[in-house]
Structure formats: C-alpha cells, structure tokens
Amino acid sequence: MRKTARYRVEGANSLWQLYSTVSFWKVVKNFIVIQLGRYTPFLSVKNWLYRTFLGMKIGDKTALALMVMPDLMFPEKITVGHNTVIGFNTTILTHEYLIKEYRLGNVVIGNEVMIGANSTIMPGVTIGDGAIVSAGTYVHKDIPAGAFVGGNPMQIIYTKEQLAERWADDPIYGKQNNLSQ
C-alpha cells in the first residue's frame, strides 16, 4: 500500500479546488522552473534548479534525463539518492486529485537506481537502493532494494538475489551488483 495522506473535499472535485490546496504563485514558479529543467542539457544546472527553487532533495551525480516531469504541485516531497538515473519523459507524482479527495505522499528513490524512459511513479512510493525499473513501468507500490521490476501493473521480474546470479559472470555488473560489498 502506498503511503499517502488523504484529504476530503466537499462539492466540486478536488482539481477544481486546486488553489485552496496549493498557492497559485507556487504553481506558476514551479511550472517555470520545471520547464527550464526539462529542456536543459546540463545535468548540474538541472539539479541546482530543482534543489534551489523546488526544494527537491537530489543526491550527487544523479541524472534526470531530458523531459523528466517532477510533480508540479509538491516537488519538495521528492527525494532522489546519489548516482541515480531517471530516464527520458518519466513522471514523478507526489499528489493525486480525485473526485471526493486528494492525496499527498512522499516519493523516495534510493541510491544507484535506474528508472527507464516513460515510467510513471505514483505518490507514496519508495524505490530501494540499486533497483532497476524497466521503461514504461507504472510504479504504484514500493520496490525492494536491488529488484528489477517492469510492466503495467508493475511486477518483480528478478529479485536482488536472482539478478546477482544472472549477472555473476558479467564483466560490468557482476562485481558491482552486490550492494553489500
């Protein structure tokens, strides 16, 4: 189960009540910063923009590829570890606006995580260190450290131990796959 806080709304659906949940000017500022970040080819500039103006926690040497879309309303609820790669056009959400409620949840992405292009990460999800998310995955629940997941609905394809066994003789990943070394 995702870890989100739920807030009931009365009357019109929660998206119609958007500016009673978040400041209009915060949304405008976030939109401008995110659009600059989405198109900049300079990873260090992008990380600086997101840390400085959005309050995101982003580790050293983390790479958010072109067109990655952090949450527009509550980007400060996103934490990304060091040396992580988030692929092209991935969306990271920390909010859900529904008919009778809205939900908010932190997204925590660990160290040395690889997230494939066009994935969607839902609010309240934790992705463990060393996990691999295949392209186009809908991440709707927590991912254990070192697991390889994919699909819609997301499923574990290989556990950390199975992946270590498969890569044991690989010249690049074989020696680095074990996060406990």
Image (cartoon, rainbow, N blue to C red):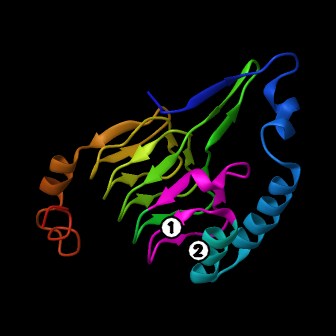
The quarter of the displayed image where residue 16 is located: top right
Q: Residue at x 27, y 53 (%)?
A: 146
Going by the numbered disc 1, the residue's amino acid type is Ile
Residue 151, label in figure: none
Residues marked 2 and 1 touching at CB (< 8 Å): yes
Residue 58, label in figure: 1
Q: Residue at x 73, y 48 (%)?
A: 73
Q: In the image, residue 131 lies at what x, y percent?
A: 33, 54
Horizontally, is 148 left or right of 105 in the view?
A: left
The mark nearer the N terminus, 2 or 1, is: 2
Whether the magenta-drawn stretch holds residue 13 is answered as no
Horizontally, is 43 left or right of 141 in the view?
A: right
Q: Residue at x 73, y 64 (%)?
A: 34
Q: In the image, residue 52 lies at what x, y percent?
A: 65, 72
Q: Secondary structure at mark 2?
A: helix
CA separation, marks 2 and 1?
7 Å
Depth check: give the residue in front, 24 or 122.
24
- Residues in magenta? 54-80
The quarter of the displayed image where residue 48 is located: bottom right
On the rendered image, what quadrant is the N terminus found in? top left
In this view, 108 is above or below 9: below
On the rendered image, what quadrant is the C terminus found in? bottom left
Depth check: give the residue in front, 38 or 155.
38
Depth check: give the residue in front, 27 or 155.
27
Q: In the image, residue 47 lies at what x, y percent?
A: 59, 74
* Mark 2 closeness class: few <14, some 14–19, many ≥20 residues within 10 Å: many
The quarter of the displayed image where residue 99 is located: top right
* Mark 1 closeness class: few <14, some 14–19, many ≥20 residues within 10 Å: many
Residue 47, label in figure: 2
Q: Secondary structure at mark 1?
A: strand
